[in-house]
Image (spheres, coloured by chain):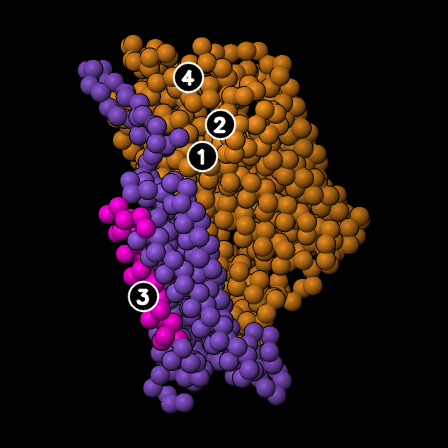
């Protein structure tokens, strides 16, 4: 019987064979350990950014200055945005579950380039350190917002250059992750597993990897141009030298809009895993979900202009971008109907992962549909740069991506640690989060609709009620987050031990010889001649002898 | 370890055996990965060419005027040097595959020397331009002083130094990669049979020269008919 990957010595290392457990973790090339380290780091950053946001909420509790002055407030929302976007949500699902689960799902022993994976993780850490270093050096953290719009970012004296360098380095890490996953998915699928036998999470990671690969270099070079602009004054984005600041916006959003699909696609993949497993029913419309991921990745490239409706674009361009933006809602809608149809007449098991997935259906639909409203040029001119778009963004990203990341955390927890958390407490934590989340963000739709501008540290008295409801929502939400992580973290050591297929799931990551899995995953690579979610009367169809990996059904 | 790797066999329900592709010794995967990496380079330089084209369409005359001041003799020589270096790099790979390790190493040395010649000529060019007062940070490329060039020229030179500079960085990285490759060959890690590293570095060098093939006409040739 092989040992779990978490035990001392059970890892391959990038350099040598260190004896100390600490160095075994630092140098590990095992995709599961790297994924866990990503999880530890990104959730730490998540909490930092959450508390920065709470500080802003306290400031906004009443009109006028409370605890922050205007400049500090600008730095605070930049810090919140930079951490959440570049350090948390972009690496997010791919770095954690793409690493831990994707190779298991396709029956691989590791990713295609395990050493590159190790290097990528440390590149990410390096980028994160650069970003944090700009907090304490120079003229303070950037105050531009996470979008670094020219020309302000070129003129401000704050530490924009350091933040830009950090974003560039983090972008490189993201490119290398995508590259590694693309090659892995193309090369290392178990024999017999063609593209339409892959679990849908793998499809999500695959579509995401293409976005990481093709869009990130464009923002990379844009950031380099902005750095050169600040250091040497090359003039590209500087209107006083004939440069065009709107060009920066275009180049920035050519990446950063696909980037939101980069965040959501693997999260949708998590949803597509959880729904069939907890409905004990084969997924409805497998191919349409798989291909809608690919088409969202494709169409997502062509919609960036909707960020620039008020920045000066021709009416024709506005109409085209508006139309294309509506268009992206179609494949997303297809996925939703497929998930709902999967649940229809299924045996629904209301475990914590399913609860998170269903909660996300509510919040993401609100986030998605409000997105359609601001895709209309006319409505957008009124609503852009108000709390309406802030609320839309958070419903889509936090209520979509992050909620599904949490769903995945609950779903794959027994896989990662071989133990299970307390179901009762996990469910309670969900309700705290769900109620707090809606209380925090829903009032912002109303405030924004009435004209509350985003990124202001002061406001007119008539908006106070909305800010105060939001504040109390934030308290509930943060309580829920702390509750949830306490439940999960305490279960790592103290949770009840469970076997390798706790949820009666069908995909390959649940057919491992030990729980948690051994170093090199499956004891033998299986031959895949079945679809990923085959259930018959609520029982998985495909069964394996976990030692020989031969089918025994 | 990759040399001793024996692929696993998966057996299907009919007892038929299928070889499992591991990450070890996956030459095709190594090539695929590097081609994908090349794609990111193309996206990056592509964005720069897009920016350049956009400003060219706005400041047509200024761009031609500024371009006519670049040194076409040195730029052209560099183009030839780089094309020849692509040839030596390619020949090196062919020799490696044919089993002529010594010849392959000679060709890599030749490529390194040509790369240094390229950088040397580039340095001469930049120095010359600096002496004419045209360089990043100098008055001519700032706005609002007596030496200021017109907008179009500032943008042209800004892009010129950015793109040739970035290209130069790629040359320097390439030299580093080739030195590393020589070390790996000497250590017996890159051999006639296992030459994926050599293949990928040759691919990289091809891309570096290919980018220059586009940079050269875009900067040096658009003003060629303008005199000076």
Judging by the rendered image, the residue that carries numbered circle 4 is A512
Tell me which residue sits at (44%, 65%) in the image: B116
Q: Which span of residues is magenta-colored?
A: B75-102
Q: Residues within 10 Å of mark 3 (few under 14, many from 20)?
A: some
Within the image, what quadrant is residue B33 found in?
A: top left
Q: Is the residue under label 2 in contact with that under label 3 (CB below 8 Å)?
A: no
Tell me whether marks 1 and 4 sit on the same chain: yes
**Picture disc at residue A114:** 1
Disc 3 and disc 1: Cα gap in Å? 36 Å
In contact (CB < 8 Å): disc 4 and disc 3: no
Q: Residues within 10 Å of mark 4 (few under 14, many from 20)?
A: many
Chain letter for the part of the structure drawn in orange:
A
Q: Earlier in the sequence, mark 1 or mark 4?
A: 1
- The subunit carrying tag 1 is A
Can residue B212 be seen here? The reply is: yes
Q: Closer to the camera, A474 or B45?
A: B45
Nearer the camera: disc 3 or disc 2: 3
Question: Residue A10: image x %, image y %?
Answer: 51, 21
Q: The N terminus of chain A lies in which quarter of the figure?
A: top left
Helix, strand or loop at disc 3? helix
- Which SS type dominates the magenta stretch? helix
Q: Residue at x 41, y 17 (%)?
A: A512
Dividing the picture into quadrants, the one containing residue A114 is top left
How many angstroms separate mark 2 from mark 1 (CA)? Answer: 9 Å
Question: Who is closer to the viewer here, B204 or A55?
Answer: B204
Same chain, marks 3 and 1?
no
Q: Please, which residue is most extreme toward the front here?
A: B102
């Amino acid at each position: 019987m092989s040992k779990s990957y978490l035990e001392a010595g059970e890892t391959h290392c990038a350099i040598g064979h260190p004896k100390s457990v600490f160095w075994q973790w630092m140098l590990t090339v095992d995709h599961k350990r790297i994924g866990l380290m990503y999880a530890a780091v990104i959730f730490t950053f998540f909490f930092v950014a959450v508390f920065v946001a709470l500080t802003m909420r306290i400031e906004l509790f009443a009109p006028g200055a409370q605890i922050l002055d205007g400049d500090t407030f600008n730095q605070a929302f930049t810090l919140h945005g930079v951490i959440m976007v570049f350090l948390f949500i972009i690496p997010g699902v791919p770095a954690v579950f793409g690493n831990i689960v994707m190779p298991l799902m396709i029956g691989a022993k590791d990713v295609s380039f395990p050493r590159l994976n190790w290097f990528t993780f440390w590149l990410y850490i390096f980028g994160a350190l650069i970003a944090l270093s700009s907090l304490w050096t120079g003229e303070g953290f950037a105050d531009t917002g996470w979008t670094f719009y020219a020309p302000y970012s070129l003129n401000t004296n704050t530490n924009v250059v350091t933040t830009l360098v950090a974003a560039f380095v983090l972008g490189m890490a993201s490119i290398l992750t995508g590259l590694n996953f693309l090659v892995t998915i193309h090369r290392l699928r178990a024999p017999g597993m063609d593209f339409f036998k892959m679990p849908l999470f793998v499809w999500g990671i695959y579509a995401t990897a293409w976005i990481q690969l093709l869009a990130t270099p464009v923002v990379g070079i844009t950031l380099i141009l902005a750095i050169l602009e600040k250091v040497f004054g090359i003039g590209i984005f500087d209107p006083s030298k004939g440069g065009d600041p709107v060009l920066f916006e275009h180049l920035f959003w050519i990446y950063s809009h696909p980037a939101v699909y980069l965040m959501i696609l693997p999260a949708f993949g998590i949803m597509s895993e959880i729904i069939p497993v907890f409905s004990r029913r084969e997924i409805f419309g497998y191919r349409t979900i798989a291909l809608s991921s690919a088409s969202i990745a494709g169409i997502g490239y062509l919609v960036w202009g909707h960020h620039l409706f008020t920045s000066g674009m021709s009416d024709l361009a506005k109409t085209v971008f508006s139309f294309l933006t509506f268009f992206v809602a179609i494949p997303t809608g297809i996925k939703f109907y497929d998930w709902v149809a999967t649940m229809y007449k299924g045996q629904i098991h209301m475990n914590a992962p399913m609860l998170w997935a269903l909660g996300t259906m509510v919040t993401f639909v609100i986030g998605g549909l409000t997105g359609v409203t601001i895709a209309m040029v006319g409505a957008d001119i009124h609503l852009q740069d108000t709390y309406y778009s802030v609320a839309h963004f958070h419903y889509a990203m936090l209520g979509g991506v992050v909620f599904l990341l949490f769903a995945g955390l609950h779903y794959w927890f027994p896989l990662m640690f071989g133990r299970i958390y307390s179901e009762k407490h996990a469910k309670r934590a969900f309700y705290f989060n769900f109620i707090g989340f809606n209380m925090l963000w829903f009032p912002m739709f109303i405030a924004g609709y009435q004209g509350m501008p985003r990124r202001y540290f002061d406001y007119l008295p008539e908006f106070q009620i909305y800010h105060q409801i939001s504040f109390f929502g934030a308290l509930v939400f943060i309580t829920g987050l702390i509750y949830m992580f306490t439940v999960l973290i305490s279960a790592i050591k103290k949770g009840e031990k469970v076997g390798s297929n706790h949820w009666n799931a069908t995909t390959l990551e649940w057919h491992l010889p030990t729980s948690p899995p051994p170093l090199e995953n499956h004891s033998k690579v299986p031959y895949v001649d079945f679809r990923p979610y085959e259930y018959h009367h609520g029982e998985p169809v495909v069964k394996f002898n976990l030692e020989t990996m031969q089918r025994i059904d | 370890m990759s040399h001793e790797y024996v692929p696993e066999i998966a057996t299907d329900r009919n007892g038929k055996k299928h070889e499992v592709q591991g990450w070890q010794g996956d030459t095709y995967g190594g090539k695929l990965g590097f081609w994908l990496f090349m794609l990111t380079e193309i996206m990056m330089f592509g964005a720069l060419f897009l920016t350049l084209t956009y400003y060219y369409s706005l400041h047509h005359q200024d761009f031609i005027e500024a371009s006519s001041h670049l040194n076409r003799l040195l730029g052209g020589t560099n183009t030839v040097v780089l094309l020849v270096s692509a040839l030596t790099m390619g020949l090196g790979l062919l020799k490696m595959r044919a089993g002529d390790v010594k010849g392959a190493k000679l060709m890599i040395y030749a490529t390194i020397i040509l790369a240094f010649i390229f950088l040397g000529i580039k340095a001469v060019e930049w120095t010359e331009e600096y002496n004419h007062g045209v360089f990043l940070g100098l008055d001519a490329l700032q706005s609002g002083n007596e030496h200021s060039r017109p907008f179009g020229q500032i943008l042209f030179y800004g892009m010129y130094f950015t793109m040739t500079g970035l290209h130069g960085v790629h040359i320097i990285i390439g030299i580093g990669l080739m030195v590393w490759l020589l070390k790996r060959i000497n250590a017996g890690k890159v051999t006639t049979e296992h030459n994926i590293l050599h293949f990928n570095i040759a691919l990289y060098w091809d891309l570096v020269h290919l980018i220059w093939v586009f940079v050269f006409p875009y900067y040096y040739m658009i003003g060629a008919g303008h005199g000076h």
